[in-house]
Amino acid sequence: MKIRTGTLAEHKAQGKKFACLTSYDNQTAQIFDEAGVAVLLVGDSASNAVLGNRDTVPITLAEMIPFGRAVASGAKNALVVLDLPFGSYEVSSAQALESGFMAMKQTGCAAVKLEGAKLEQIRALVDAGIPVMGHVGFTPQSVNALSGYKVQGRDEQGAARIMQECKDIEAAGAFAIVLEMVPSELASEITEALSIPTIGIGAGNGCDGQILVWTDFAGLDARSPGFSKQYVNLRKLLSDAASDYVAEVSAGEFPTKQQSF
Ligand code: KIV
């Protein structure tokens, strides 16, 4: 079944939790799509996960576009969302619209995500027919302003601010909100207070959906955040396979007649 923004709203109404993963390429998009992952986020985490940058700050929209196109063409059913990177929407709604149109026209993705309560930008994008996913709590593009990777909304004032941001983002027209690194209790309260679905990452079990960065979930990165879960150790599998290949080539055992013409 093709997942659309309305499908996620139906899932919330029916109390049906859904799984989301990041993806940056065609093959993982096909695999995760076939496995029933509801949302594939072409995250700006591609900055560190794929391009080897320290964080998500350096990646540009031009660099995101090929990743978005690869994922959109690999996914048959999943809703594919492209992250608008740092510097591509904050200045004005005109800038957000320019980036949003470029994202939609050049990738085939069905929605965009942006960080923080950028209400004017969200309204402008939604009015233009571009579905928007919000993202609050720890917002990685603001890692420098937030002084590092820290749980947000631990105190009463911080929690109230995040709750208000979520309500404002919902009122601005977003179809879902990512809650990153916020206390489970706060995430559950937000999930109850909103009519749009919440998608948690490091936000406990009370959200409507969950999202993981696929290179963390598959153990491809040497280090992964404490809130993530490694479902397979792909780094070890690939490393073992590469060592076997090196050994067989060195020993003259590959290729055999079977792999030769
Ligand atoms: O870019 C990304 O991977 C994200 C997730 C952390 C939600 O925004």
Image: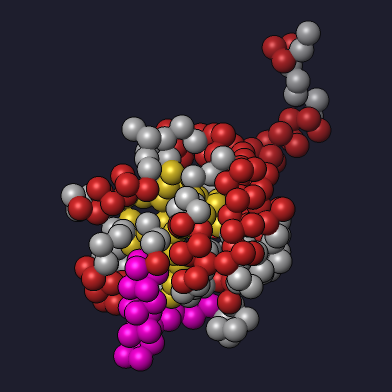
* Quadrant location, the C terminus: top right
Q: Which residues are magenta?
A: 149-171
Q: Residue at x 47, y 50 (%)?
A: 129
Q: Residue at x 43, y 40 (%)?
A: 78
The x, y position of residue 149, in whole percent, is 53, 77
Q: Is residue 24 above or below residue 116?
A: above
Kindly report the secondary structure that dominates the magenta region of the rendered protein: helix
* Quadrant location, the N terminus: top left
Judge whether residue 166 is colored magenta.
yes
Residue 43, by quadrant, is bottom right
Judge whether residue 124 is colored magenta.
no
Q: Residue at x 55, y 52 (%)?
A: 82
Tell which of 184 and 91 is nearer to you. Answer: 91
The x, y position of residue 231, in whole percent, is 43, 50
Q: Is residue 42 visible to the viewer in this orientation of the structure?
A: yes
Residue 180, by quadrant, is bottom left
Q: Is residue 104 above or below residue 55?
A: above
Q: Is residue 87 above or below residue 80?
A: below
Q: Residue at x 63, y 57 (%)?
A: 99
The x, y position of residue 55, in whole percent, is 64, 68
Answer with left or right where residue 49 lies relative to residue 197.
Answer: right
The x, y position of residue 137, in whole percent, is 43, 75
Q: Is residue 225 visible to the viewer in this orientation of the structure?
A: no
Answer with left or right where residue 104 lies relative to residue 130.
Answer: right
